[in-house]
Image (cartoon, rainbow, N blue to C red):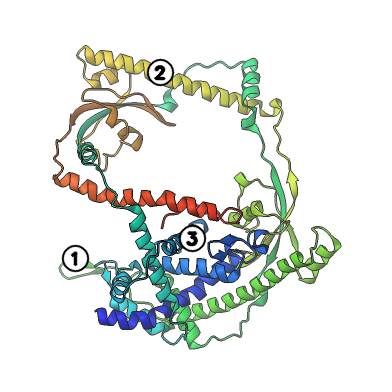
Amino acid sequence: MFNWIQTNLTKHYKWFLFILLVVLIVPFVFTIGNFSPWGGGGPSYKEQPFFQYDLSSIEDQRAIFGRGQTSMTMNLPSFYGNLGEAYLQSYSLSRAAYLYLADQLNIPGPSKEAFKEHAQSLAGFMNFSTQEFDATQWTNYVNSLAASGLSEVYVTRVIEEDYRVNKVRELLGGPGHILQFEAIRAAERQNTEWTVETASMDYSEFAPEITVSDEDIEQYFETNSFRYEVAQKTKASYLLFDPAKHLDEGYNPESGEKSIHFFTHKARYQAAMPKLKPIEKEDGTTETPETLEVTLEEVEDQVIAEIRLDRAKKETQKMAEAFAYRLFDLEIENGSPEFEAAVNNAGLQLNSLVPYSESTVATQNNVSAAALRQIFRLTRYFSDPIENGDNFVIIITEGTEPAYIPELPELQADVKADLTEERKRTLFIEKGAQLKDLITNAIKNGDTFEAAAQAQKLNHKSFEVFKQNAQPPEGLDSSMINQLSNLEEGAVSEWIASETNGTFLFAAKKTTPTFEFEAEEVISYVEQNTALLSASNVEPIVSEILMKELEGTAFEPESTQL
């Protein structure tokens, strides 16, 4: 197995993932958000230092985000494609920070044996059933892409970099040590057995008499007028670049191009295959045949159509980028005769949008909310060319509508409803405190919790015994489970008020085990939490370094976790 991996991995692995880089990553880098060479509305036209890179450089963007996303295809294959732009950006930037630390700490690359072991562990090439390296799956990729003629260094370097990233995490994270008494107490809490009962009241059934005067409404509005502010809205329009105008129906791709496209998107084609109906056997049982593996011949027409569309989209993207660069390079002002001439000469039309605020962005005229949101990142009046489905759009700002607070007469009904609801909620909380006193006293006088709850016309429920670390019985949500740690056997919880009801939790029985450190439950707790503790040690270090390095750039990662 190791000889097979060494031969095929170092010689062929690069073809598959570099093709993914070309087909999936490069369009992402050049067309979406901050990865675009147009750079989020201004910052990309000036130097943006980031460790040894310049984030305004197209080549450096390829190095960071191209390798970052290639790394994701190997390490997170189940999630790749389902994660948003922000996560992909954070992953790539954080990965660069880890590699910077690897350089500072002089962490070497892997040996041949370490390289093979690391490559064999990659989730992207594991059999999901056996959780082992799948040589057949790997061979299929290699056979389909072996003739692509790409660099031999690229993927090997990505794997070596990921190896060094893991070593940084191990080094900085430390052993993730947990004190013995902490582990014992935590394991005992997790394995505590509970028998609980609940008593609840529906909020909709709580109907106290509430009187609200005009003076009350005026005073409430004066104190809470900020709640009714209509946010500032941006006035905007957009230019649509339609690839349908550049679609070449006569283009016939070569077999190699069709094969690459097919294998890149094979999972999507396979998912669209019709499911076979179950077959009834002679013994009365049924058997569902396995769906046959999709072939290129079966979806060839679709593949050709998609390739033609991809070519048209690339041509459309070039035109959109050229138009945006013309506006920038010639310093064409919005609304000027030069702007109108540029729009007309390009065969475009300026389309109006309903003014919107950042908190109320929604799809308009088939322009996605994600595309419209880009306007709030701009430092000039036009956006980058933004991929919008099969089209590209450039968003144009046209000023703002200032924020304002409507006069009270316009809001009278809304303010009255809000004040009434606020008072009802306050009374509901007070009702809970009164009910607890009544139920607690009834239990002290010998009543069961059930009898005490029913006397107050509350809905009573009993639940089967369960452990605190296990899936709670249906009807007990997380807010209730969180109350358990504060309860002793025979005690009634505080009134747990939610939007829909109020609930008391009664600890009918509580059985807490006693463990030694060698107990299986304690060992299991330590094993499960050591890695998490180690990762939490690394996060603040990398986060501080990354955020400091990103100051003054257009990039803002949401997380530094890999």
Tag of residue 285: 1
Q: Is residue 339 left or right of residue 239?
A: right
Q: Position of residue 470 (x, y in %)?
A: 24, 43
Q: Residue at x 36, y 62 (%)?
A: 166
Q: Residue at x 58, y 75 (%)?
A: 309
- Name the amino acid, label 3: Leu
Tag of residue 472: none
Separation (CA) of disc 3 from disc 2: 49 Å
| Disc number lying in front (2 or 1) | 2
- 475 in relation to 290, above or below: above
Q: Is residue 161 left or right of residue 357?
A: left
Indicate which disc, 3 or 2, sits on the residue closer to the N terminus: 3
Asked if the residue at tag 2 contacts the one at tag 3, i.e. Cβ–Cβ closer than 8 Å, the answer is no
Residue carrying label 2: 431
Q: Quadrant of residue 203?
A: top left
**Considering depth in this image, is 110 or 66 the residue closer to the camera?**
110
**Considering depth in this image, is 257 or 40 the residue closer to the camera?**
40
Q: Position of residue 412 (x, y in %)?
A: 66, 25
Identify the element where label 2 is drawn.
helix
Asked if the residue at tag 3 contacts the one at tag 1, i.e. Cβ–Cβ closer than 8 Å, the answer is no
Q: Residues within 10 Å of mark 2 (few under 14, many from 20)?
A: some
Q: Position of residue 485 (x, y in %)?
A: 28, 31
Separation (CA) of disc 1 from disc 3: 47 Å
Residue carrying label 3: 88
**Considering depth in this image, is 441 or 281 the residue closer to the camera?**
441
- Name the amino acid, label 2: Lys
Q: Quadrant of the N terminus?
A: bottom left
Asked if the residue at tag 1 contacts the one at tag 2, i.e. Cβ–Cβ closer than 8 Å, the answer is no
Separation (CA) of disc 2 from disc 1: 58 Å
Q: Residues within 10 Å of mark 1 (few under 14, many from 20)?
A: few
- Name the amino acid, label 1: Thr
Q: Quadrant of residue 191?
A: top left
